[in-house]
Amino acid sequence: MTIEATAPTIDSIDLTDYELWRHGVPHELFTLLRKEAPVWRHPDTPGTERLGGGFWILSRHADVQAVSRNHAGFRSLEGPSLPGEQPGQEGMRIVSMDPPQHTRLRRLISAGFTPRVTAALEAQAREWAVAIVERALEQNECDFVHDVAYELPMHMIADIVGIPQSDRTWLFDRVNILLQSTDPRSYLTPEERTAIQMEMFGYANQLGAEKRRAPADDVWTTLTLAEIEQPDGSRTSLSELELDLFFMVLTFAGSETTRGAVSSGLLALLEHPDQMKRLRTDPSVINTATDEILRWSSPVTYFRRTAAQDVEVRGARIGAGERVILCYASANRDEDVFPDPFRFDVTRTPNPQVSFGGGGLHYCLGANLAKREIRVLFEELFARVADIELLSDPEYSVQGIENPITVGLKDLHVRLLPR
Ligand code: HEM
């Protein structure tokens, strides 16, 4: 007996169903949304109850870009994820600030992430990449997510922030546990999550005290010692909670996202041997390949905004205060922008991928750094490895629409054959 799969319909979509995300982003549903309901109000379902009710999803590239660039119409105050900020923390992280607070904080931190600064970090990134790849090669078989993709972004962001090497495993283990903590398979209670968060806050405070005692040329010294001009012209330091939350943003954003791009990038290359061959025989395509890896993997599935007033988008009326999802993963497969969007093509040009956001004030601060890390890692990997064999089907982290940055590979077991 054959069972015919029924085609999904708009009415049957419930993106809060974890099962839909078991193999990554459910692209077939977003393709349907782009075609039939590009501005779609997710209905209230039992699953949306835990997320505060229904919300809007923008799935087209043009809409994601337009809303990203309209900070007056769509604010960030309530945070970038559907569940929103924890009580008392609205507007306290860079990702949940609007001007003028956002402008002041962003100006302060952006000096640490200019193209010139990240270019100067290239040699350091390469040194780390060589050491990481060589260690993985010694093991012969490895979990590429944990042993390779996890390591480079962790060390780079830790070098930039000024986190001593001896503390990194302890600290980033906690980042990892928190990131997995809404996956039903490694679920932590809210109390357990708060306890880990408090440990990280304690660490950030202690690191700040050390930087005050012995200032260094790193981002944590800059932030700890910074005085920010207030609207009345007075100058104040960042509060302890603001610093703690900034520490969380930097350690999370700086590690998990790039790890996702590197591991999904390798999987895409393994699944498309012609593209792997193209990249390996002509390393000059590494820059277009990096953009294609970012487009293909969309390590941040979405960011949320909140409508500041009643507004109409493509004829749909979005009410003031309603939540709007900017779905980067869907915009990156938009047929109107990317010819043959489900073709993985390491030479794709132009490639206006929106993995770092659709532009505007909140555009990813670490975009230059992340691109450099991805490029350097693949260059050093392919310089040392003759062949890479996939040993088993990879497993995905399954946290659904709840968490915008964790729809990625949980593991990727491979055998690396040295040159
Ligand atoms: C492949 C890797 C990365 C991806 C896909 C990514 C993606 C994003 C996205 C989608 C946003 C929100 C944009 C918006 O709201 O318009 C963002 C913001 C941000 N990213 Fe990244 N990111 C990556 C790597 C990094 C790295 C390495 C850092 C290092 C510090 C970083 C730091 C930040 C910060 C601080 C923000 C908030 C900026 C603001 O609100 O003004 N990201 N990123």
Image (spheres, grey):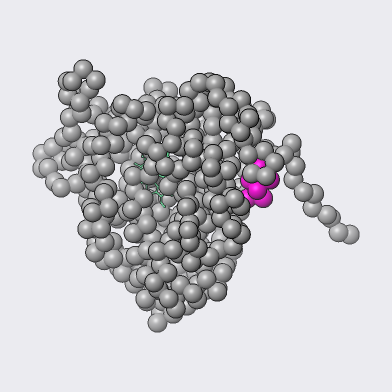
| Residue 35 x/y as whole percent | 67, 44
Seen in the picture, residue 200 relative to 238 is either above or below; the reply is below
The residue under the point 49% across, 35% down is: 67
378 shown above or below 226: below
Ligand 1 is in which quadrant of the figure? top left
Residue 162 shown left or right of residue 15 in the figure: left
Res. 390 in view: no
Q: Please tell me which residue lies in front, 80 or 340.
A: 340
Residue that extends furthest to the right in the rendered view of this protein: 1
Q: Residue at 45%, 67% (x, y): give it.
A: 142
Q: Which of 283 and 17 is in front in this view?
A: 283
Q: Where does the magenta region start and end?
A: 27-33
**Quadrant in which residue 55 is drawn:** top right
- Residue 219 in the magenta stretch? The answer is no
Q: Can residue 323 be seen in this view?
A: yes
Residue under the image location 42 percent in, 69 percent down: 285
Quadrant position of residue 287: bottom left
| Location of residue 90 with respect to 208 vertically, above or below | above
